Image (cartoon, helix red, strand yellow):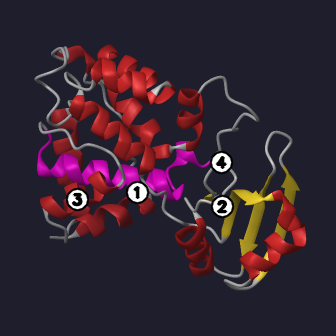
Amino acid sequence: MRLSNILVTASLTFQAVQSWSPMLPNYRSSMQKVPSSATSLFMALDYNDPVVAEEFAKTQTMTLEECESEITNMGIPVPKTMNEMDVKLMLVELRMRMNGSFSEEKKEEEVPDSFSSPFEEALYTKPQFKQLYKLFEEAGDHNAMNVASEYVNDPELGKKRYGSDYADTLSQIDKALTAVTPVTSPTVSFSGFPANMGEAGCKMTLEALGEIVEFECAASDDFPILTGTVTFGDIDTAKAAITQYNGMDMGMGTKLEVKSV
């Protein structure tokens, strides 16, 4: 089938269903039923956009299971009510959002210098968690929204309060919080190297992985650690830095955080 025909079919199907319902898998037994009015359109794909057409074409060789697996690996639950076409459209949207090619995502959201709570920090720094929270919000699921905010702010208390009735929800939140953001840039930010390494020692450590094009480093005002950004010569080196150092315990009371910028 020609791509133009596929897109027409997809467009008609998408208009017919009007939206994909963000009801979460394994979630219905513990949450209130979502009213039909809450199933608003999450986004309208522009089929005249060649980027959309290219991404959509890539999904046509994929099975439903492959699409669901990729979406789940991003930390986003796939609603059980979605048909195969909707799942593929959802995958197209998520891919575009993750790689920055979706027009609404091209302008970077300004991240505050400080956060009022761990929940606010997660919304700004954990894209998969933000996406999951949007699903709760789109569904009008205030129970899940409250569970998410309380659990992220105080995990131990959250487990005590919601561990039995909302176990699936907590599992989804954990997966979204720990999901690895795709590396699409040779630049990574870092936080947690011991301050006594000094700028030179920190740069030398990272330079052992590969060429460094740019490097910025400063000591934290709150902890004896170094924070900064480094731009490597290529994306593969950036991936290697994240793989090797992200989550490493440097003995400073906190773990290293190395992530793509």
Residue 26 position within the rendered picture, expressed as x and y whole percent measured from the top left: 14, 35
Q: Position of residue 139 (x, y in %)?
A: 29, 23
Residue 138 shows up from this direction: no
- The amino acid type found where label 1 is placed reads Arg
The residue carrying pointer 1 sits among few (fewer than 14), some (14 to 19) or many (20 or more) residues within 10 Å by Cα, namely: some
Q: Is residue 212 magenta?
A: no
How far apart marks 1 and 3 lie (CA) works out to 13 Å
Question: Label for residue 253?
Answer: 4
Q: Main secondary structure of the magenta part?
A: helix
- The label shown at residue 233 is none
Mark 1 / mark 3, whichever is N-terminal? 3
Residue on which disc 2 sits: 250
For image coordinates 17% across by 51% down, the residue present is 85
Image quadrant assignment for residue 209: bottom right
**Tag 4: residue type?**
Gly
Q: CA distance from mark 1 to mark 4?
A: 35 Å
Image: magenta residue range:
82-106
- Element type where label 1 sits in the image: helix
Q: Answer yes or no: do the residues labelled 1 and 2 have beta carbons within 8 Å?
A: no
**Residue 197 or residue 203, whichever sits in front:** 197
Front residue of 253 and 4: 253
Residue named by callout 1: 95
